[in-house]
Amino acid sequence: MVSIEPAHLVGTGGAIGALCRHYLGAAVDVEGFPMGTLTVNIAGSFVLALVTFAGLGSDILLFVGTGACGSFTTFSSFSFDTVHLWESGRHLQAGFNAIANLLGALAAIGLAWGLVALVGL
């Protein structure tokens, strides 16, 4: 069996996640609201939960979880976007962004958990 260094797993996953984040974020972003960040945070939460609950092994967790999901999702952009909306006087949008990121991520995690339980992984 070929052994891959953990740093290579994380780095390769990170490169893939960053590219996916760029293209998906750009595809769904809308003027005036950070829909791209919201989308990638929810999707990334689902994928990370899926590989975690499925127990796919430490190499997969390093590649997908730490690498790909780590660079795909973005807490810093979420925080910046929320503060920017608030400081721009768009308080309702700022509140919606904060709540949607949290509840969307929790719902995605619950969906992944349910899917893994249903499939029996």
Image (spheres, grey):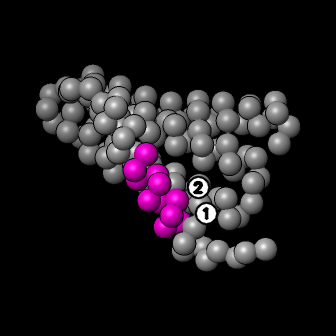
Locate the N terminus by quadrant: bottom right
Residue nearest the viewer, comparing 44 with 107 = 44
Q: Residue at x 59, y 38 (%)?
A: 46
Assess disc 2: are there few (<14), some (14-19) or many (≥20) residues with their C-alpha within 10 Å of its C-alpha. many
| Magenta part of the chain | 10-20
Mark 1 falls on what kind of element?
helix
Query: Majority secondary structure of the magenta segment?
Result: helix
Whole-angstrom CA distance, mark 2 to mark 1, is 5 Å
Per the image, the residue denoted by label 1 is 62
Asked if residue 77 lies left or right of residue 118, the reply is left
Q: Position of residue 69 (x, y in %)?
A: 51, 51
Residue with the most extreme top position: 92
> Where, by quadrant of the figure, is residue 92 drawn?
top left
Per the image, the residue denoted by label 2 is 65
Q: Residue at x 67, y 43 (%)?
A: 50
Residue 37 shows in the view = no
Q: Residue at x 26, y 26 (%)?
A: 30
Q: Position of residue 118 (x, y in %)?
A: 81, 30
Locate the C terminus by quadrant: top right
Residue 58 shows in the view = yes
